[in-house]
Image (cartoon, helix red, strand yellow):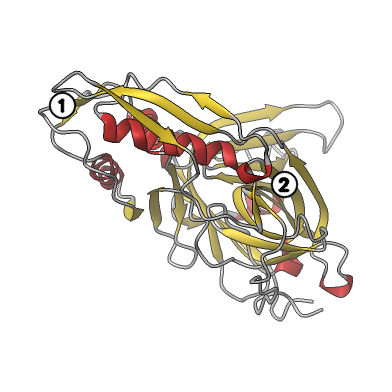
Amino acid sequence: MALLPSYFVVQVAFAPLPPPFSTALAEIEVDASVEGAAAFRLHFDLSRTLLGDFDALAIDIFRPLVPIRISVSAGLGVAHTLINGYVRDARVNVANEPGRSTLEVSGMDALGTLMGHVQVPMIWPNLPDSEVARAIFARYAVAPTFVFPTPPTRTMVDTTTTQHDKDDAYLQQLARRNAYEVFIQPDPVVGIDQGHFHPPMTFAPPQGVLSIDFGSQTNLASFNLDYQMLQPTAIVGVATEPKSRLPVPVFGVMGREPPMGLEPSLLRILPPPIETMDVSDAANPAEAMFSAVSRATETSRAIRASGEVDGLKFNRPLLPGLPVLVRGAGRAHSGLYYVVSVSHRIIKSGYTQSFQALRNAVGLTGMEIFVDPLAAVA
């Protein structure tokens, strides 16, 4: 059991959820991912008032783009902010039977709302992609804490970078070009939004240990794995040097991420597969080489896992964008995984987290330390 009581907090326009709404709130869902904007859904059970209106609709507090903050404490005593979102949709289902009418309010973080609200063309001369991402984050009061540098391969001599898309779509375009992830994640304690623009942080320390079929330490209700054995591939291509117009060969023989297990997925295939890649849109051979290596890195993540975590036993939210250790799945498939998405489901009687994670290797390395000091005491 947890050392401290668990609870959740929902704030609307920086104020606590009013009593009629907090009483009617039946379920909270928060979806977070490294592949796009985070989203939330608030489910309310509607009841009639003496005047015949619905209790949670009598006061119109869920207006367009009203800020919503959702936090949860799973037993550590400190509320962990899951999302800073903005209202974008509301759905009302009215039924004839008493107590069957519902209200669902949904929204997304700044990446899925504010950043796609206004389209203004911009010119970014002589700036690497990371500095462009930093400037876009700052425009929406998102701290660019985790913006990693990108190679300054584009200069005015080669090409002038011009933005025509909205900010959310353009950030995704920059991320794809560099094989980066772009997402927004609140600081867990302070709650300030932090911008992420970086390669997958598979090198970071694991955020905890997930255990399946492990006695009293089991905190996974399920764990499923899909291994696409022939997905990893080496990349070859030909780029054109912009000044001399001569062809330059480019290669992506191995991924740039360290293997998360004993055997890298690409090295397990004999003979090794090779794929040609069109790099004609690259500004120069350096950018083409970077794209080839990025593509090889992407294909090497051939092992994808999914599961459901008991949030109260794990004792904290599982975060996308960080590794996690899995044990109890056999020697081949236990070990380090990189979490790419998490769906939180909070009801008044429990807290579960469904996740998806990936891996670029098979087997235990022997360096894993399956110790989780933050787990709930059994």
Q: Check contact, mark 1 vs mark 2: CB within 8 A.
A: no
Residue drawn where x is 45% and y is 23% of the image? 277
Q: Nearer the viewer, residue 213 or 41?
A: 213
- Give the residue at the far front of this rendering: 271
Question: What secondary structure is found at the residue carrying circle 1?
Answer: loop
Name which residue type carries label 1.
Asp
Give the quadrant of residue 76. Answer: bottom right
Identity, as a three-letter code, of the amino acid under mark 2: Ala
Q: Residue at x 89, y 71 (%)?
A: 215
Residue shown at 45%/28% (left/top)? 236
Neighbourhood count class around disc 2 (C-alpha, 10 Å): few under 14, some 14–19, many 20 upward? many
According to the picture, the residue beneath numbered tag 1 turns out to be 158
Q: Residue at x 57, y 52 (%)?
A: 320
Disc 2, SS: strand
Residue 137 visible in rendering: yes
Up the image or down, 3 lies above or below 27; here it is: below
Q: Quadrant of residue 79?
A: bottom right
Q: Residue 356 placed where, x, y %?
A: 67, 46
Q: Nearer the viewer, mark 1 or mark 2?
A: 1
| Tag of residue 305 | 2
Quadrant hosting residue 303: top right
Q: Looking at this view, is 207 or 250 the one in front? A: 250
Mark 1 residue crowding within 10 angstroms, few (<14) / some (14–19) / many (20+): few
